[in-house]
Image (cartoon, grey):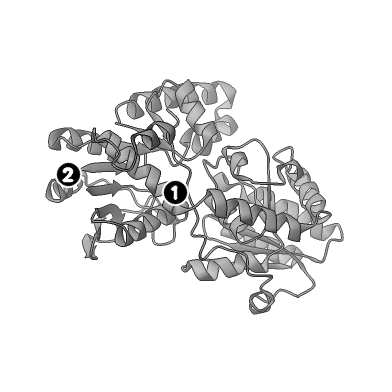
Amino acid sequence: MRVCDLTQFYSPRSGGVKRYLSEKQRYVESNGKDEHYLVIPGERTGSWHGERTHVYTVASPRVDRTSRYRILWNLRQVRLLLEKIQPDVIEVGDPYQLAWAALATGARLGCPVVGFYHSHFPDAYLRTLARYGGRWAERVAFAGARLYIRELYRRFGFTLVASHRLYQLLRDWGVANVVRIPLGVDTEVFCPSGKDWEWRKTCGVPRDAFLLLYVGRLSREKNIGTLLSAFARLRKGGQRQLWLLVIGDGPLRFRVAQTAREVGGLVWVEYVESKEELARYYRCADLFVHPGIVETFGLVALESQACGCPVIGIRGTQMDENILWGLEYWADANSPDSLAEAILGARRVDLSLWGQRVAREVLQHYTWKHTFGRLWQTYRKALGQEDPSSSCATKTSFVR
């Protein structure tokens, strides 16, 4: 089977979507006779070819000066690449112009197209309208987004989602072809291995500090401002043993630098390339803080739990179902005070026991092998093929 992924949610320093696609290519390289093709925007047009995996970049402009993402406007080049690749299945990872181009080309090639709903963009971007246009403008924008999502995703063979809440939301919005496929973790890399004191020392964090960790983009939609404000309030309130390690980059990097100057106790790492190094950061921390309120899955939270580092955040998001223990300690409201209170509350819990428990749960239920096994079943269903391993497995493995 030739599988081709198209997405604009990809850059050399991007997060969850890049991890998903990288792990998919690793899965293809180590399993069977399938081939995987990835078409993404890049600084220049080019290609890279492995034994069974291939990457094509199409020269594309940046979204803006500060963004690491690019807009893939050259849809003609995408069409030519798809005609050259002749895929059996196309998977689209974003809901914009690339999705419509893939649907049109797939129809011409007689190739099924599935869409992975990685980001719930009405939550991520449209709530900004409430600050400028008021509640009426926000309601109108959400109604338009809902109509757009229904009209686009009903055209795919299947719409893939990672969380049950997002599955139910899209079903309620009239998208009937939804399949839930939770993402996974490389449990050989992201696993408990005791507190990494040596790595903490390398980071410049005192051994007796209580270390908070954040991994993600420094942007408004990631709600990093709430975390920085909560941390500053705790430090100013006398919690000087609290330290914060921030891994990521983005337009709000100035807020990170400002907080470090004002209250101290903050270490900033712009990017971590290797999984092995990232796992060491998880293992040297005491508590992972995920302030996001518009996440569709929260892969970094799952990786942290796999390493035995408990996670705290703000309740009521798509990510709740992937928090395997301790959700009752999370913040009740999206505010610095509520998040600060949750952090202090988590400190009073046996974090070692908490970490051991969630690490076991991840190992049992969240592996990439399980994720891609279900994904390939979906591809075969899109192609009208019976699952070769078990027809019963096909019937029971999907939430439809």
Query: Looking at the picture, does residue 220 appear above or below residue 139?
Result: below
Q: Is residue 345 left or right of residue 392?
A: right
Nearer the observer, 184 or 387: 387
Query: Looking at the picture, does residue 98 appear above or below residue 229?
Result: above
SS assignment at label 1: helix
SS assignment at label 2: helix
CB within 8 Å, label 1 to label 2: no
Residue 87 location in percent, x, y? 19, 46
Query: Looking at the picture, does residue 341 appear above or below residue 203?
Result: above
Tell me which corner region of the image, top left, top right, bottom left or bottom right, holds residue 215: bottom right
Residue 125 location in percent, x, y? 50, 38
Task: Tell me how far mark 1 sits from mark 2, CA to CA.
Answer: 32 Å
Residue 238 location in percent, x, y? 87, 61
- Badge 2 is on which residue? 79
Inspect this view and state whether residue 60 appears.
no
Q: Is residue 393 left or right of residue 228?
A: left
Tell me which corner region of the image, top left, top right, bottom left or bottom right, holds residue 103: top left
- Say which quadrant the C terminus sits in: top left
The residue under label 1 is which amino acid type?
A: His
The residue under label 2 is which amino acid type?
A: Arg
Tell me which corner region of the image, top left, top right, bottom left or bottom right, holds residue 284: bottom right
Inspect this view and state whether residue 291 appears.
yes
User: Residue 370 — which label?
Assistant: 1
Nearer the observer, 226 or 215: 215
Dot placed on the residue nearer the N-terminal end, 1 or 2: 2
Neighbourhood count class around disc 2 (C-alpha, 10 Å): few under 14, some 14–19, many 20 upward = some
Residue at image position (71%, 74%) is 205
Residue 252 location in percent, x, y? 57, 55
Residue at image position (47%, 25%) is 141
